Image (cartoon, rainbow, N blue to C red):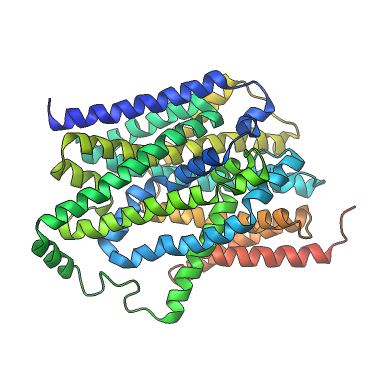
Amino acid sequence: MSHLNLASLVFFATLALTFGAAMLARFRAKPSAEEDLAGRSLNRWLIGLSAGTTGNSGFIVTGAVGLGYAGGAHWLMLPLSWLLGDLVYWSFFPDRLNRLARETGAATLSEVLTRGLQGRAAKVLSVAVSLVLIVFLSMYISAQWLAGEKFLSGIFDLSPLTALIVFSLTIVAYSSLGGFRGSIYTDVVQAFVRIVGTAVALGAVIWFALREPSVFAANIEAAGPGFLSAFPDATWLSVLGFVAGYACAAVGFGLGQPQIVTRYLAGASPEETKAARWIYIGFLQLTWIAMTLFGIILRGVMPGIEDPETGLSLFFVTHMGAILTGIIFADVFATIASTSNGILVSIAQTLRRDLLAGLFGTQRNFSLLAMTALTFLIGVGTIALSFVLPGNVFSIAIDAVSKIGAGLAGPVMVRAFHWRHNALSLLLALTAGIAAAFVWSALGYGGVMNEAGIGIAVSLGVNWIVARAMPPPP
C-alpha cells in the first residue's frame, strides 16, 4: 500500500467517526424548541471543547502557520494578545449570557438582544442583527472553504475547484444531518483529534530541524534579522495598538459569534458555563501557539514554500511517514470542519428563528427534514461565495470576525450587564459600531489597531447617548 493510500485510510476513519457522531445526534434529537440548544444541558467539558474547536477555525492550520512562516516570532503576539481579551471576556460574560438566556428563553444571539423589547424598533433590530450575522458569517465560512481547498489540493493533487467542492460538500452533508446537537458531538470528537495532531505536528518539525541544526540555523538567519523578534522596528504606541486591538477583537469574537455564544447559552447552569473557562482558553492557546511555532520552525526546515498556508500538509506529505501524515490529514480536516459546521448551523438557526420571525412576526417552525434542507442550501450558497471573495484565509476570516465584533459586542455587553438601553439605542449602536469599523479600515488604521476595538467603543457610546436622550421604557 502506498504512503498516500495508507495516510488516507487514517483520514477516512476519522471522517467516518465524525459522521457517526452526527448520526448519533440525529437519532437523539427531540422535536421541541429546546432542541435548538440540545436541551440546555451541556456540562463544562462539552462547552469548553465545543467552543474551543469551533473557535479554532481553518485559520489555525493554514493562516497561523503561514503567518509564523512569513512573519516569524512577531505573530506569536497575536494569540497572546487574544489571551488578554479572553481573560476579560471569561471574567464577565459567559455565565451572564447563560443566565440571561434562561431568564428570557433566548436561543440565538438575536433573541438575546431583543427579548423583552417592544415596538417597531425591536423588530428592525432583530432583522438587522440577523442580516449582519448572515452576511459576515457567510464570509467567515467562505474562508473555511478556502482553507479546506488548500488542504485537499495540496495532498491529493486535485484542482483547486475540485478540492473546494469535495471538501465543503462533505462538511455541509454532516452539518445538515446532525443539527446543533450534532455540532456539539462532532466538536468533541474533533477536539481530541486536534490535540493529538497538534502534538504530532510540533514534535515532528522540531525533530526534523534537530537532524541538521546548522542548515536550520542558516535558513532562519536568511529569513532576516527581525524574524525572531516579537516586535521588530516597532514603537511602544504600535505595540500597544496591536495588543489592545486584538484583545478587543477577542472580546468581540466571544460576544458576537453565534456559533460560540450558543455554546454558552446551552450550558446546564451559569456556574457550569463559567467553569469551562480554562478548558476553552487552554485548548485555544495550545493549538494556536503550537501552529504558529510550527510555521516559524518550518521556515528553517523548508525555506521557499510558495504558499506558506499549505505548509502543514506539505511538510508531512514530503517528509513524514504514512501514519503520522494521516493523523495530520485528520487534524486539518477536524480544525476546519468544526468551525464550518458550527457556522452553518448558526446561520440556519438565525435565518429560521430570527430573520423569518422578524419579517413575518411569527416563529417559523421547521421540521428536522426542512432544517436539513435549509442548512444544505446555505452551505451551497457559501461555497459559491468563496469563488468571488478576494484575499487569503487570514484576511477574510479576520475581517469578518472584526466587523461582527464591532457591531454586536457592544449591544450584547449592554444586555449582559443590564445597562440602560432600549430597542432604538441598541439598533443605532449596532449600526454605528459597524460603520466606525468600516471607516477605520478605509482610513488605513486597521494595521495600527484592529477595528473591532474602535467599533465596540463607538457602539457603547452611541447606546449611552441615545438611551439617556429618550424616556425610560415602562
Q: Is residue 79 left or right of residue 218?
A: right
User: Where in the figure is residue 183, as x and y percent of width and height?
Assistant: 50, 33
Seen in the picture, residue 87 relative to 381 is either above or below; the reply is below
- Residue occupying the point 12% across, 25% down: 1
Of residue 206 and residue 233, the one placed in the foreground of this image is 206
User: Where in the figure is residue 366, as x and y percent of width and height?
Assistant: 64, 24
Of residue 364 and residue 226, the one placed in the foreground of this image is 226
Residue 126 placement: quadrant: top right
Seen in the picture, residue 110 relative to 352 is either above or below; the reply is below
Is residue 310 something one can see in this rendering? Answer: no
User: Where in the figure is residue 103, as x and y percent of width and height?
Assistant: 76, 42
Of residue 67 and residue 306, the one placed in the foreground of this image is 67
- Residue occupying the point 30% across, 54% down: 65
Seen in the picture, residue 274 relative to 161 is either above or below; the reply is below
Q: Is residue 355 left or right of residue 118?
A: left
Is residue 162 something one can see in this rendering? Answer: yes
Residue 259 placement: quadrant: top right
